């Protein structure tokens, strides 16, 4: 067995479930805030699964453990608290991270979470404005409920920060958002660039039945507008030759290998990162047109690293020791790796 990754993994990023009660319009689990895509809401990691996959002795190697994911909110996983408690008890020094919309669970649950996350830990709550404004993006959540939960967590000793995505509708209120949250005991408010408008200035938002509700506009503040990545432009996403030229212009600096991180999705598959994990779910469910087709084509060149490795069939040691997984970050001639870990070749 090649022990390269077995001994060296230092961070686990985990998706505890692909379920969520919210429908943020730029989340891949739904189409512009409308009905959820049909392939989500099927998976959940239970405490028993987790304990079987990750023995306490193996967790002591970890520097960092965090729950986020591509398609769900960790709070929807029934054993979220119990899994965090198990990691904390197995490895008191591992840094714990939990990313959530925080609009679920009662005050007692949040106080118990604070006991687990009171040191070497950080809870990150998505808060995109104050009451009324916040819900324009975080559809299906409630600002007042989030504040009640955050108060319970912070007052019980938990460490919380807020992550606020900047849009046109909240860009004039950033100071007020920051001062309000800091005064409630949040350690920090992080304002986030939005890279999901691509080359658009706004998107239409829909309700659960697919009826249009409101428009979401890109911020005009230059620092938060994000990039117009060429991956999404009409030329690259529909023309094979253009894609080839674009891939050839990149050199990959694989951060999965330098960060020594693995991503475990809610079905129990292990991937080198969440971007590749998302690719595999999307491709399995994608149409054969345009960008989906080219993305599949480019991924076939890095086939080995895309072989699904399930913790439901194998141990973590076996998964990380297999040759196909070992190729992650070594043969990344695909769109996803070029986007996230690619640098322009110097001419
Ligand atoms: S809260 Fe997270 S998982 Fe849920 S819809 Fe919003 S971005 Fe997606
Ligand atoms: S995008 Fe590719 S190279 Fe970058 S971390 Fe993920 S698997 Fe590794």
Image: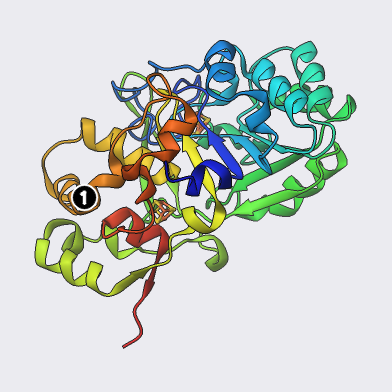
**Which quadrant is home to the C terminus?**
bottom left
Give the answer, above or below, for where 249 lies relative to 79. below
> Where is residue 320 drawn, in percent x and y?
44, 38
Residue 88 drawn at (x, y percent)? 75, 27
In the image, is the residue at mark 1 within 8 Å of ligand 2 by its beta carbon? no
Q: What residue appears at the point 81 percent right and 48 percent down from the top-left corner?
A: 179
**Label 1: how many Cα within 10 Å (few below 14, some 14–19, many 20+):** many
Horizontal side, residue 325 vs residue 111: left or right: left
Indicate the position of residue 21 as horizontal and vertical percent values: 50, 19
> Where in the figure is residue 97, as x and y percent of width and height?
67, 37
Q: Residue at x 52, y 35 (%)?
A: 136
Q: How many marks?
A: 1
Q: Which residue is mark 1?
A: 295
What colouring does the structure picture have? rainbow
- The image quarter in which residue 157 lies: top right
Instruction: Judge by depth and name the residue closer to the eye, 297 or 223.
Output: 297
Q: Residue furthest front?
A: 1
Quarter residue 144 falls in: top right
Give the position of the N terminus as an image quadrant.
top left
At x 56%, y 19%, the residue is 50
- The residue at the far bottom in this view is 347
Left or right of residue 171: residue 297: left
User: Is residue 126 shown to the viewer in this render?
Assistant: no
Q: Is residue 246 above or below residue 1?
A: below
Residue 50 shows up from this direction: yes
Residue drawn 22% across and 50% down? 299
């Amino acid at each position: 067995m090649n022990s390269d990754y077995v001994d060296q993994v230092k961070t686990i990023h985990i998706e505890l479930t692909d379920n969520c009660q919210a429908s943020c319009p730029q989340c891949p689990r739904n189409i512009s805030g409308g009905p959820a895509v049909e392939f989500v809401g099927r998976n959940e990691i239970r405490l028993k699964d987790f304990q079987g996959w990750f023995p306490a002795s193996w967790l002591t190697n970890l520097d960092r453990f965090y729950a986020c994911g591509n398609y769900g909110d960790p709070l929807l996983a029934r054993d979220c608290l119990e899994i965090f408690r198990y990691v904390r008890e197995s490895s008191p020094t591992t840094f714990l991270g939990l990313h959530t919309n925080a609009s679920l669970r009662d005050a007692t649950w949040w106080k118990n979470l604070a006991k687990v996350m009171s040191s070497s830990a950080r809870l990150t709550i998505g808060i995109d404005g104050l009451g009324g404004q916040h819900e324009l993006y975080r559809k299906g959540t409630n600002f007042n409920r989030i504040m009640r939960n955050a108060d319970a967590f912070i007052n019980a000793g938990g460490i919380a920060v807020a992550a606020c995505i900047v849009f046109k509708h909240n860009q004039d209120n950033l100071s007020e958002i920051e001062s309000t949250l800091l005064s409630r005991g949040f350690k920090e408010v992080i304002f986030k660039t939005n890279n999901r408008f691509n080359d658009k200035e706004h998107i239409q938002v829909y309700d659960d039945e697919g009826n249009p509700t409101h428009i979401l506009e890109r911020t005009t503040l230059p620092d938060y507008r994000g990039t117009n990545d060429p991956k999404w432009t009409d030329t690259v996403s529909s023309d094979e030759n253009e894609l080839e030229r674009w891939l050839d212009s990149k050199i990959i600096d694989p951060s999965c290998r330098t960060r020594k991180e693995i991503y475990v999705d809610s079905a129990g598959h292990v991937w080198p990162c969440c971007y590749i994990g998302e690719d595999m779910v999307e491709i399995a469910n994608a149409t054969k047109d345009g960008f989906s087709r080219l993305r599949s084509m480019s991924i076939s060149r890095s086939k080995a690293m895309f072989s699904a490795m399930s913790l439901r069939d194998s141990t973590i040691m076996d998964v990380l020791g297999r040759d196909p997984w070992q190729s992650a970050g070594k043969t990344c001639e695909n769109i996803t790796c070029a986007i996230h870990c690619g640098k322009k070749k110097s001419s």
